[in-house]
Image: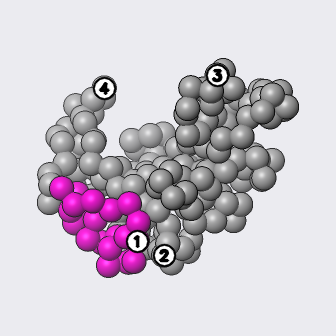
Amino acid sequence: MMLRLQDLGCHNINFVTPTHVVPQILEALVLAIDGGLHVPLVYNSSGYDSVKTLRLLDGIFDIYMPDAKYSSDDVALKYSGAHGYTRIMKTAIQEMHRQVGDLMMDEDGVATRGLIVRHLVLPGDLAGSAEVVRFLSEEISPNTYLNIMAQYRPEYKACRFPELDRRITAKEYNDVVRLAARAGLTRGLAIL
């Protein structure tokens, strides 16, 4: 499948939420690389990753694309059931950046190596965006490519949480973009 995607002209092979199948991915990569696979490999995750697992991947993945969902463990636990999310997310992103560094792109603007962090803006700043921005700028790199996402939609069980039962406003999104810009995180920013 990876070789077929490469033959079709894909820019990369993107593994989404891959932690539970890392052994199978590594086994498949041996065959794919022997078969001529050469496009960048992307590890696309929630950011709730084990550093132990990430260290096994050192030198294998070219691009890490984690989420930085929350800056509060209480919020992460309440909405995602993720115990100790902020410490785990921060140490995972630090390890990812150690391995691949800041995002690099080719002459066509296609990512070839590095870190891309995604942050979904939530209503009422439930994601704690200021702390996410501060962490990335000060503890990772002011050159971090940050994708600030505006597509939050109240789905599934959001109706159980009145504070999450609405879309974000353009102002809420733009406030986070301005926070990022003031912190020097200008790569990937777009104002609505």
Q: Is residue 182 magenta?
A: yes
Dividing the image into 4 quarters, which one contains the N terminus? top right
Magenta residues (range) = 173-192
Residue 67, given in percent of the width and then of the height, sits at 48, 50
Secondary structure of residue under mark 3: helix
Identify which amino acid the numbered label 3 is placed on: Arg
How far is the residue under mark 4 from the one under mark 2? 35 Å
Q: Which residue is mark 3?
A: 4
Which residue is denoted by mark 4 in the rendering? 156
**Nearest to the observer: residue 110 or residue 145:** 110
**Quadrant placement of the C terminus:** bottom left
Tell me the residue that label 1 is attached to.
185
Q: Nearer the viewer, mark 1 or mark 3?
A: 3
Is residue 83 left or right of 62 when viewed as pictured? left
Question: Which residue sits at x=47%, y=53%?
Answer: 108
Amino acid type of disc 2?
Answer: Pro
Which element carries disc 1, helix, strand or loop?
loop
How far is disc 3 from disc 4 in space, using C-alphas? 35 Å
Residue 64 colored magenta? no
Mark 2 near mark 3, Cβ–Cβ under 8 Å? no
Marker count (numbered): 4
Q: CA distance from mark 1 to mark 3?
A: 36 Å
Q: Amino acid at mark 1?
A: Leu
Mark 3: few/some/many CA within 10 Å (<14, 14-19, 20+): few
Q: Are discs 2 and 1 less than 8 Å apart at CB? A: yes
Q: Which residue is mark 2?
A: 142
In space, the residues marked 4 and 1 are separated at their CA atoms by: 32 Å
Q: Position of residue 82 (x, y in %)?
A: 52, 44
